[in-house]
């Protein structure tokens, strides 16, 4: 098949768009890995469903799985047993898990009364979506999970439901 001048220009345009899109995708995928998080983040604290305070500062220096979730989010609820299993099995290896609920206190308390978890839960309200966006959640959707290394940098992030196998794979990859 022969292309005329217009056909060549069209093909070149499509190729250029594909290259730019591919480069953009590559940058987006790498953006979360090794991303530094400022001291303001680590100085953050959140109320818990029990009324206590959950401070992030003491968690710095140990690997951390941070999960943004809500009681009204079906994939968030489905992944909680996997997060809980990971928290219990990897705690002896120094791992921490924190769930930040982009929800109000009362629904979270009621939910946890029926579905308790062994890991720490903090309350962010809808400000949690903004916080998750600052941490690389481009769409602002839930659930959103991050893996922080011992140095406090984001090593992995995942939009959507995660699994125990995924979390264990992340943990084994960084040791």
Image (cartoon, helix red, strand yellow):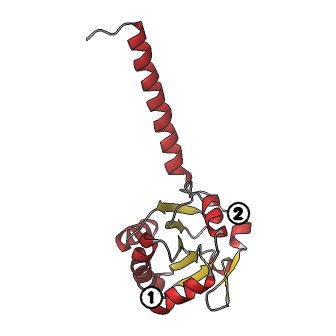
Q: What SS does tag 2 mark?
A: loop
Disc 1 crowd rating (10 Å Cα; few below 14, some 14-19, many 20+) is: few
As drawn, 87 above or below 134: below
Q: Does residue 36 appear in the picture of this structure?
A: no
Q: Nearer the viewer, residue 31 or 48?
A: 48
User: Residue at point 69% right, 68% down?
Assistant: 41
Residue 160: percent from left, percent from top? 44, 63
Which residue appears farthest toward the left when viewing the image? 1
Residue 109 x %, y %: 56, 88
Task: Provide residue 72's location: percent of width, then percent of height.
Answer: 50, 74
Question: Residue 96: which disc?
Answer: none
Q: Tell me where residue 61 sits by quadrant.
A: bottom right
Determine the residue positioned at 68% across, 77% down: 57
CA gap, disc 1 and disc 2: 33 Å
Visible in this render: residue 38? yes
Quarter of the picture containing the C terminus is bottom left
Q: Circle 1 sits on which residue?
A: 115
- Labels 1 & 2 near each other (Cβ < 8 A): no
Question: Is 39 displayed left or right of 48 in the figure?
Answer: right
**The disc label shown at residue 38, or none:** 2
The residue positioned 59% from the left and 73% from the top of the image is 102
Foreground mark, 1 or 2, reads 1
Q: Residue at x 50, y 86 (%)?
A: 111
Question: Does label 1 or label 2 sit earlier along the sequence?
Answer: 2
């Amino acid at each position: 098949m022969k292309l005329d001048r217009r056909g060549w220009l069209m093909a070149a345009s499509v190729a250029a768009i594909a290259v730019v899109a591919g480069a953009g995708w590559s940058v987006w995928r790498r953006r979360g890995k090794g991303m530094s998080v400022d001291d303001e983040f680590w100085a953050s604290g959140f109320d818990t469903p029990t009324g206590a305070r959950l401070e992030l500062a003491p968690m710095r220096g140990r690997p951390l799985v941070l999960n943004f979730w809500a009681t009204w989010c079906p994939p968030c609820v489905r992944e909680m047993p996997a997060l809980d299993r990971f928290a219990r099995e990897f705690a002896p290896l120094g791992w921490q898990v924190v769930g930040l609920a982009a929800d109000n206190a009362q629904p979270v308390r009621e939910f946890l009364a029926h579905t308790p978890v062994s890991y720490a839960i903090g309350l962010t309200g809808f400000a949690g979506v903004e916080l998750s966006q600052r941490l690389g959640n481009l769409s602002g959707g839930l659930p959103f999970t991050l893996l922080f290394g011992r140095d406090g940098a984001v090593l992995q992030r995942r939009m959507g439901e995660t699994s125990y196998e995924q979390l264990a794979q992340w943990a084994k990859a960084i040791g």
